[in-house]
Amino acid sequence: MTDRSAPPPLICSSCDGFASVAITLGGRDRHGHLRTITAHCPACNGLGAIRPPRTREGAHA
């Protein structure tokens, strides 16, 4: 019997799995908090992984 479970997702080659980062804008607000923005990897939409290409059963190489 064949195993029909989905293969594990591949790590995104654009961000190496670090899909979201916090970037400091420099300076602090009046409460003393560091101002940051969050940026997501555009290749994997912030997931850190991409789905492997699907192989169709019965397809010939």
Image (cartoon, rainbow, N blue to C red):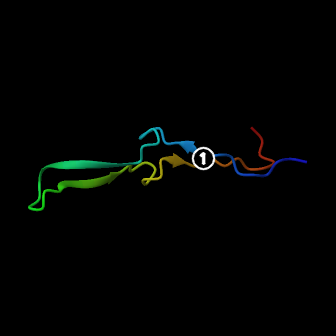
Q: From the viewer's perspective, is 47 left or right of 31?
A: right
Q: Secondary structure at mark 1?
A: loop
Q: Residues within 10 Å of mark 1 (few under 14, many from 20)?
A: few
Which quarter of the image is occupied by the C terminus? top right
Q: Residue at x 66, y 49 (%)?
A: 54
Q: Residue at x 61, y 45 (%)?
A: 52
Residue 34 x/y as whole percent: 18, 53
Using the image as rendered, state which of residue 50 and residue 17 is in the foreground: 17
Residue 18 x/y as whole percent: 42, 43
Q: From the viewer's perspective, is 1 left or right of 27?
A: right
State whether residue 30 is above or below residue 10: below
State whether residue 1 is above or below residue 30: above
Residue 28 x/y as whole percent: 12, 54
Tell me the residue that label 1 is attached to.
9
Q: Tag 1: residue type?
A: Pro
Using the image as rendered, state which of residue 35 and residue 14 is in the foreground: 35
- Please, which residue is most extreme toward the bottom here? 31
- Please, which residue is most extreme toward the front here? 31
Q: Residue at x 49, y 42 (%)?
A: 12
State whether residue 60 is above or below residue 33: above
Instruction: Count the marks.
Output: 1
- Please, which residue is most extreme toward the left here? 30
Residue 23 x/y as whole percent: 25, 48
